Image: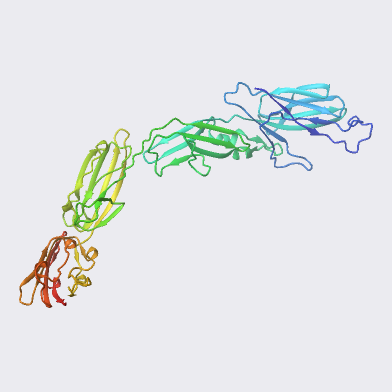
Amino acid sequence: MRRTLVFSILTLCLALPLASPRCNAQGEPIIHFKPQQADAALLTAYSKLAPGATQDSLFIIALPANAASTAVTLSANVTNGNNAKLEIQEIVFSPTDYSYSWRTIAQNPSAKEISTTVSNPTAYRVLRTEGTDTTKKRIWILFDNVHLTDIYIDDRCDARTLTPRFNYDRSTIIEELFAYPDLTSTYLLPINAIGRIYFKNFQWLDDRLTPLTDFSTSSLKIDAPPPLEPQGYRLIVTNFYGRVLSASSPLLDPISVMAEMNVQYIDKPDSPAAPWQPAGKTLTHEAPLFLKLGDNAKNADSLFWTIRNDPRAVRSGEKDTLFFIKALASERITPEIDKNLFSAGTYIATLRAKNNRIGCSDTANLTIHVDSSLINTREIPNVFTPNGDFINDVFRLKNPETSVRSIRNFKIEIFNRNGQQVYSYSGPPRAWEGWNGKQKNNGPDEPQGVYFFIIQAEGWDGKSFRGETYRGFIHLYR
C-alpha cells in the first residue's frame, strides 16, 4: 500500500534585506508537507524544548490486516520561493550510545518539490538549503497495524469470560508499539503517551446486537447468571482517533447448570383438595404440610432431591436425611412428600442439578419452617347468645386461622350442669362450625344457663392439649 504524506512548513523572512535570496517579490518561501490520507495527526510530547522551539508533527497511518507493504510516499513542495536544494533524511540511532544522526534518502540540488518512499516508522526531516540558509522540519511517522483477531472464551461452570485477542498483546500496544524517543532528553527516553490512550471504548453485544453492558470494559464476565442458552457475541473496539476494530464469536452452547426449584404446597392443610401454590424461597407453614417437589432446572441431565431434618432433632438422635431421590432431568418427576414427614421444626430441601457430560452442577435450597402445635385458649369465648340475631349466635373458636396451628386430632365435648353431654365434635379444628345452642346441633334448644366444655387435642409434633387449661365454662344467654 502507498499513501502520500505532505507536510507544510512556514519559513519566515525576519528583517532580511530585499536582495536576500530567501525573499522575493512573490513573498516568503513556504514549504508544504501535507498528509493526503493520514488517519491521525498529533504533536509530539517532548519534555525539554528549547526556547522558541515547537513540538514535531506526528502522523499515524492505519494499516489493513495482512498489509503486503508499509510503503509511504513523503513529498514536499515550495511555493513563493526560488529553486533550492531539497533533502529528505531519515533518523539513525547509534547502537552504542544515546545519540543519533541523519541519513539522506532523497535529494534534489535545485527544485521546488521532492518526494520519496519510506517504510520505517521513525522520524524524518526535510532540509531546504538556499545559499547559506537552511530550513529544517522534522516529523514522525507511526504505523497502526493493531488488529482484533478474535474473542477468547473462558467457559467455566459459574461464569463465562470474554476477552479480546489482538495481534499484539495489550501491554505491547500500550507500552511499546506507539512509543518514540524523546529527542530533547539526554537518554532519549521513550514516550508512550499514545499507547496509553489507544483504546477508547469496548462495546460488547450479543448475537442479536443487543448491548450486554452500559459501560466500556476490556473483558466481560457473565456470571449473574452465567449463560444458560446458546449465545454468540460481538465486540466493537474504538480507538482514540476513531478507528474501529471488530470481531464475532460463533454461537456457543452453554456449559453452566441452573438448579431452579418449583416446589408447591397446599395452603389449607384441612382441605387437601385445595390447589397447589408456589412455595417461594422460604416456606413457613403449619402441619400437616402437603409438599410437592418440582423443578425448572436448565442444562442438567440428573437431579438429586434431599430433605434434611431439623438440626435439633438430629442432635437428639434422629436421622439427618429424611428424603432422597435421584432422577433423570428429562423425566420431570414431581414427587409428593408424605405429610407425616414434617412436625414442628426447620427443614432444608435441596435440589442438586448436574450435567454429567460437562461436569458442572448447581444447587438450590428451600428453607421450610413448620409451626409448633398451638391452641390459643384466649380465643375460646365464654359467652354466646344463640337468639337468631346473627351476632355471637355460635360458640366456636375466634380467629381459627391463627388461634389453632398444626393440630393433628381435635375433639370438644359440651355438658350441661347435670353432666349430660349436649354436643360433641371430632375432626379438623378449622372445619368445626361451632355449637349453635341446640342439642347435638340439630335438636331442641338447650335452656339458658352455664355449660362446661372439654377440649382434647394432639399436635403433629406430638404435643398433647388436655387438662385444666383446655376446660372451661360457657354462659348461654337467649
- On-image quarter of the C terminus: bottom left
Q: Position of residue 317 (x, y in %)?
A: 16, 55
**172 left or right, relative to 336:** right
Q: Position of residue 437 (x, y in %)?
A: 13, 71
- On-image quarter of the N terminus: top right
Q: How many marks?
A: 0
At horizontal 21% and vertical 42% (from top left) the residue drawn is 325
At horizontal 24% and vertical 64% (from top left) the residue drawn is 402
Location of residue 447 with respect to 399 vertically, above or below: below
At horizontal 88% and vertical 38% (from top left) the residue drawn is 14
Location of residue 443 with respect to 108 vertically, above or below: below
Residue closer to the observer: 423 or 375: 423
- The structure's colour scheme is rainbow
Residue 269, located in which quarter of the rendered image?
A: bottom left
Residue 343, located in which quarter of the rendered image?
A: bottom left
Q: Position of residue 432 (x, y in %)?
A: 16, 63
